[in-house]
Image (cartoon, rainbow, N blue to C red):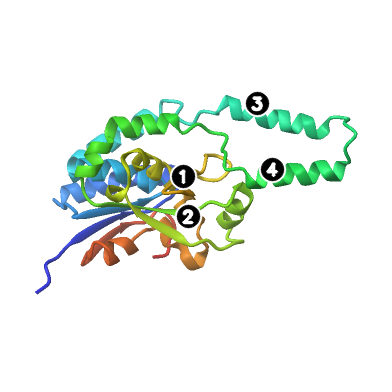
Amino acid sequence: MQKKKLGIVLSGGGAKGAYEVGFLKALSEFGIQPHAVSGASIGALNGAIYAALGDTTKSALILEKLWNDLAHTDTLKLDTEKVIKNIVDVLTYFSPMPVSRLTKVVMTAMKAGKSQEGLLSQIPMIDRLKQYACVEELKKGLPFYVGMTKSHGNLQDVANYFELGKEEVVFKKIQNLKDEEIHKAIMASAALPILFDGLEIEGEIYRDGCLGSTENQWGNTPAKPLVTDEKCTHLIVCHLGNGSFF
């Protein structure tokens, strides 16, 4: 008889990620401890702490404190340097230079479309990962997978977000990555185009797991690797939206 193996899947869903704290508290009350965890977008950030601590009760307590702190702090900070650069681009576009308006439109669109940069700084969230889910704890913690998509620049990534394009979802096991890429992979899974930078993992630029099309939307609810790679016999999935297929 096959031994039971439980996996917990934390879906993406932005600010609704606070709901996952209540989900973990409920698991704690039932004494449920998983063998593996996966997450995407905000679920990757919550999942990182869960996997690092390896304990449902402790994770629920820490995440509740973290989300309460986030409610009273300015975590989403503009990257001033990037904002200034974008303002300069706009001023250049409208300047009376001897360049045709069509050329300016094309050049501006091409530059913005290929850009991997976002307007918000990722440093505050990286600092919290270092505080609550350091690299060493993650390496020793529960097997942890994040869903992400390859980035092709802001324009195509936004198209994928609105399901106008198709992009294959990639799953990365955090424990298989180099130390310097572990936190970057977690942040990449939550990096929406235009808002956050695409991040390089194993030679490729990645962004939010939710960017896959409806045909490949395992990325926002990354159950697949827990079944195929970790051989989990049972999954408990925390959905944050109706569109999270798996």
Q: In this orientation, does residue 140 appear?
A: yes
Query: Residue at position x 25%, y 44% from top?
Result: 50
Secondary structure beneath label 4: helix
Instruction: Measure the C-alpha gap from mark 4 to mark 2.
Output: 21 Å
Give the amino acid type for the residue marked by disc 1 in the picture.
Glu
State the residue position of label 4: 111
Nearer to us of marks 4 and 2 is 4
State the residue position of label 3: 84
**Which of the two labelled residues, at mark 2 and mark 3, occupies the earlier sequence position?**
3
Secondary structure beneath label 3: helix
Give the amino acid type for the residue marked by disc 4 in the picture.
Lys
Instruction: Measure the C-alpha gap from mark 4 to mark 3.
Output: 16 Å
The N terminus lies in which quarter of the figure? Answer: bottom left
Query: Residue at position x 60%, y 30% from top?
Result: 82
Q: Is 79 on the left or on the right of 85, as rendered?
A: left
State the residue position of label 2: 149
